[in-house]
Structures are given as C-alpha cells and as structure tokens.
Image (cartoon, rainbow, N blue to C red):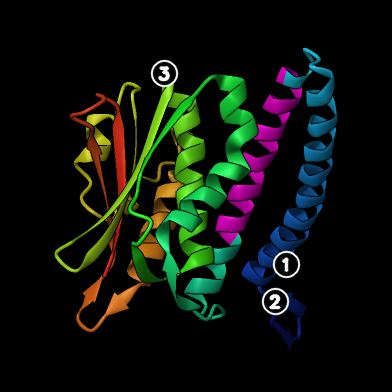
Amino acid sequence: MYKVKMSIDLNGPQIEFSGILAASVHEMKNSLSMLINYLDNVIEHFEKDKTSDIKLLSQLQYNAKHVNNNLMQLLALYRLENSLYSLNIGYNPVVELVEDLIAQNKTLMDYKGITLDVDIDSNLYWFYDKDLVAGSLNSIINNSFKYTKDLIRISAYEADAYLNICIEDNGTGYPDHMLQNGRTQESSISFKTGNTGLGLYFSSMVARFHKNKEREGFITLKNSSVYGGGCFCISLP
C-alpha cells in the first residue's frame, strides 16, 4: 500500500503530492488493467469470426496497453526511489521471460504484420528481478512497434560476466542526440518535445538496481548494423 504523509499546522492539513500521485496511479492502473482484460476477451471473440473490426480493436488494445505500461513504470519508479520496492532476484531462464512477452504482444504483432526473430539459448539462466526486467523489455518492444518496418529481433547472451538482452528492429534507428547521451539515457527526457523517454529512464533504473559487488547494470542504445534500425540492450551483472 502507499502511504500519504500529512502534517498539521495553523493553515490546516498538508498532503504530500507524491503520495497522492502514487495512490492515483495505482487506482488508474487497476482500472486500465480491467479494460485491457475485457479487450483481450473481445478480440479473442472477433478473431474466431475473422471480422475486419479486429484491426480497430487491436489498435485500441495497443494504446490501452501503452498507457498501462506508463502507469506501471511511474508506480515502479516511485516505489524504487522511495525504498518501497524489495528486489525479488531469482535464478530465471531468459527464454521463458521473452516467450511470456511475445505471448502478451502476439495479437498486435499479427495485426501489424511484424516478423519476430528470437535468438536465445534455452539453457541461458541469470539472476534478475523478473517483473522489473519484463516491464523494461515490454516497454521497449511496444516502442519498436511504432518504428519498425516489419521486423523485431530479440537476442540474449552472456559477455564479460553480464547478461545482455537486446531488442532491435529494421526501422529508421535512434536519432543522434539519443545515441550521444551515454549509457543511462536519463538526459533523454524532454517535456518540451513531448517525448519523455519514460521507458528508457525506467529501463535505466531497472538496470542500475541490479548489482553484483562493485558492478551495476546499464543500458545502451545504438543503431543496428544488421538491420539498420535501433538496437536497445540492457546489461545485468
């Protein structure tokens, strides 16, 4: 639960805004999750009838999930930065993590005609918080839906004692100013342009909360030499 701090003075009660915002985000997320579940059921029904309305419903589902992901990220960031989240580090298979994400996004990939290429060893296991890493990757995959032409590739491998999970596409790639911001990408947030970079900021925080002795996780952005589009990687020690 989220605590709302109050203090009493001569001017009356004062409520900490961050607590109100966190509680409000939590309520909105729950309501939106119910809507998404309803949409999933409706889409499943229309898929059986092969109706053309499935395209409109899929787009609605995508937008609803996008908003829901943003709310989940805001909530997680609040909990992380206020020491309200306890990392749940487990020794998990990486391929199952990715397969779960693919299942969640299959309807929209089919609707957009996106081909998915997965290159992950089934024997690759690593220590990480499954919920946080899944939230990070899901955000990047959803972002790729907007910019890819028709291909998304997800790969994972171990190098230099880090687990590297990469998502790349065959779109136009990241702009230069994003590639110049370094590993954490925290400076990519811009409210003036409307591109807050929330997903990248969240991914950066998720990576940094994964630590092993003196090493901590990080994210990197580059433009893929294989497909020509953007390539996001999260590296966990």
Q: For residue 149, which numbered disc appears in the image? A: 3
The residue depicted at 49 percent of the width and 26 percent of the height is: 146
The residue depicted at 34 percent of the width and 49 percent of the height is: 120
Tell me which segment is drawn in magenta: 55-74
Q: Residue furthest left?
A: 160
Mark 1 is surrounded, within 10 Å at the Cα level, by few (under 14), some (14 to 19) or many (20 or more) other residues, namely some
Depth check, mark 1 against mark 3: the one in front is 3
Residue named by callout 2: 2
Q: Is residue 198 visible?
A: no
- To which quarter of the image does residue 211 belong? bottom left
Residue named by callout 1: 23
What's under tag 1, amino acid-wise?
Ala
What secondary structure characterizes most of the magenta part? Answer: helix
Foreground pick, 108 / 215: 108
What's under tag 2, amino acid-wise?
Tyr
Q: For residue 107, which numbered disc appears in the image? A: none
Secondary structure of the residue carrying tag 1 is: helix
Q: Is residue 141 visible?
A: yes
Circles 2 and 1 in contact, beta carbons < 8 Å: yes
Secondary structure of the residue carrying tag 3 is: loop
Q: Is residue 103 above or below residue 112?
A: below
The residue depicted at 84 percent of the width and 19 percent of the height is: 49
Q: The C terminus lies in which quarter of the figure? A: bottom left
The residue depicted at 65 percent of the width and 32 percent of the height is: 107
Q: Residue furthest front?
A: 123
Magenta-drawn stretch contains 68: yes
